[in-house]
């Protein structure tokens, strides 16, 4: 049985929370001030501290500065409103989570279900760091280069908190693997991890998929459907390609993040959710806001703790490790192990990898299939060094844009005043032509997912 200390100056609220904590099998004590809290913690160190921010003798944050007193207790802040500032404060001061008052029974049950001493999380991070030294792996990620070690440091720092994480990086760099590693190191690991590619769901269905719908709410809704927020309750929801989410749905997502409630399509009854959101995008966030692909207020709410993944070309020293890792995976799946020759590794090191780690995995899969023996040579590996086709916006006639015949030279000229939708179409089609209609390279060069590229080409009738 664990012990909880409730630091709350409102006597009725303190009694209510103490009763809820006791109903979950914890012993509970209350303290109306910082002074009483210090006294009780000295007498009986608690496993969990529910700490109000506004107390008669000071701010609750002051207690978090007293590490000798806090010791190995898990601290959850209580606040009258959820805000970006609260999230940042919780991270900065080492709090594991925060609750919005008035605290509901479901919120508190969620917190109690994942109480874990900070020392346990710290021990797991040490184990992962030992694995990194021995195997070159950190959770689901592979690599020992300096850029990746920085990523691991950030994951280890943020995983044990409830703070929202925003992962950025080019397509194919492994953003979902970062999200999974964050989840596996968090207190939510026993609950679901769900990944949603916002660019892979039809704009007409995405609201229903994320928030669910009631029976009869629209044509074809033959039964009630639970959305991702309900199915991921207590766990982590990974929203990939967040800039592909329709703007009207971004408003509703912002409300869920702020209030912890949502409504199914066709319902007027709010549903509570306790989900940690990890978002990701493969384009610059400032550019996404400027072009209207991402609401500015949502960006600030999601981008509490940014993690940027390096492209593979900036971590070439990880190539041998990644090659060995992927070939081992393929060998275990196919029942035969193969290795890459020195010539193969040299060829791979010279390649620019526009599709990043995902492209490397696909290249090795093909080479494995095409190689009869146990050693993969450079015969079936990429030889050219692709370069993206930049779009040069210049006050010239639009007649020289892509599609005027022949293979583009790598320069696309667009007239001033050309609608953005037209520019996007011209850039996509010109880049596709430049890469010989190789869709994965085209998507990587444009910084979008393969699904997004297919959706655009479908719109263009290609």
Image (cartoon, helix red, strand yellow):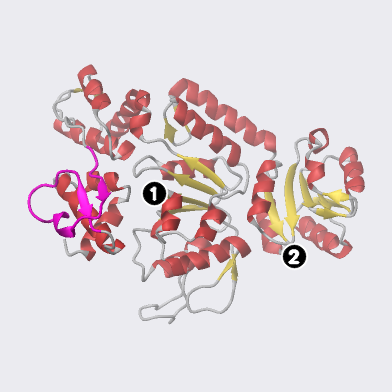
State the extent of the magenta-drawn residues as a range.
387-415
- Left or right: where does residue 188 sit relative to residue 421? right
Residue at 18% from the left image edge and 30% from the top image edge: 381
Category of crowding for the residue at label 1, using alpha-carbon neighbours closer than 10 angstroms: few (below 14), some (14–19), many (at least 20) = some
Q: Which residue corresponds to mark 2?
A: 102
User: From the image, which quarter does the C terminus lie in?
Assistant: bottom left
Q: Which is more N-terminal, label 2 or label 1?
A: 2
Decide: is 292 above or below 144.
below
In the picture, residue 332 is in which quadrant? top left
Q: Which residue corresponds to mark 1?
A: 283
Q: Which mark is residue 65?
A: none
Residue at 56% from the left image edge and 40% from the top image edge: 185
Q: Nearer the viewer, residue 159 or 109?
A: 159
Decide: is 219 above or below 255.
below
Residue at 51% from the left image edge and 62% from the top image edge: 229
Label 1 sits on a secondary structure element that is loop
């Amino acid at each position: 049985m664990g012990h909880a200390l409730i630091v709350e100056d409102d006597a009725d609220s303190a009694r209510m929370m103490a009763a809820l904590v006791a109903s979950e099998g914890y012993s509970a004590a209350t303290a109306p001030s910082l002074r009483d809290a210090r006294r009780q913690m000295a007498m009986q160190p608690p496993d969990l501290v529910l700490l109000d921010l506004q107390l008669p003798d000071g701010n609750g944050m002051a207690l978090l500065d007293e590490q000798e007193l806090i010791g190995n207790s898990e601290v959850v802040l209580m606040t009258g409103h959820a805000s970006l500032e609260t999230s940042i404060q919780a991270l900065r001061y080492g709090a594991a989570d925060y609750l919005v008052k008035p605290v509901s029974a479901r919120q508190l049950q969620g917190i109690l279900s994942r109480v874990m001493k900070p020392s346990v999380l710290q021990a797991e991070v040490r184990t992962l760091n030992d694995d990194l030294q021995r195997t070159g792996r950190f959770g689901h990620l592979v690599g020992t280069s300096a850029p990746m070690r920085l990523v691991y440091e950030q994951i280890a720092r943020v995983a044990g908190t409830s703070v929202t994480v925003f992962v950025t990086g080019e397509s194919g760099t492994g953003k979902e693997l970062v999200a999974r590693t964050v989840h596996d190191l968090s207190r939510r690991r026993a609950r679901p991890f769900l990944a949603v590619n916002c660019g892979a769901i039809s704009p007409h269905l995405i609201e229903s998929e994320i928030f669910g719908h009631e029976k009869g709410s629209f044509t074809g809704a033959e039964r009630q459907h639970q959305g991702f927020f309900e199915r991921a309750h207590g766990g982590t929801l990974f929203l990939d390609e967040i800039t592909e989410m329709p703007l009207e749905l971004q408003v509703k997502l912002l409300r869920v993040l702020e209030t912890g409630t949502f409504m199914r399509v066709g319902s007027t009854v709010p549903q509570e959710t306790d989900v940690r959101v990890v978002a990701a995008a493969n384009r610059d966030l400032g550019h996404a806001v400027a072009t209207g692909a991402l609401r500015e207020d949502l960006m600030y709410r999601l981008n509490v703790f940014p993690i940027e993944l390096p492209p593979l070309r900036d971590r070439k020293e990880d190539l041998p490790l990644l090659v060995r890792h992927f070939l081992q995976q393929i060998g275990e799946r196919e029942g035969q192990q193969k290795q890459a020759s020195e010539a193969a590794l040299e060829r791979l090191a010279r390649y620019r990898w526009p599709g990043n780690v995902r492209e490397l995995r696909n290249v090795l899969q093909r080479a494995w299939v095409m190689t009869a023996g146990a050693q993969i040579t450079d015969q079936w590996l990429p030889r050219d060094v692709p370069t993206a086709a930049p779009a040069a916006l210049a006050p010239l006639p639009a007649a020289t844009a892509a599609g005027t015949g022949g293979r583009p030279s790598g320069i696309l000229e667009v007239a001033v005043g050309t609608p953005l939708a037209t520019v996007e179409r011209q850039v996509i089609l010109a880049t596709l032509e430049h890469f010989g209609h190789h869709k994965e390279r085209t998507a990587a060069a444009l910084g979008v997912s393969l699904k997004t590229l297919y959706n655009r080409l479908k719109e263009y009738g290609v």
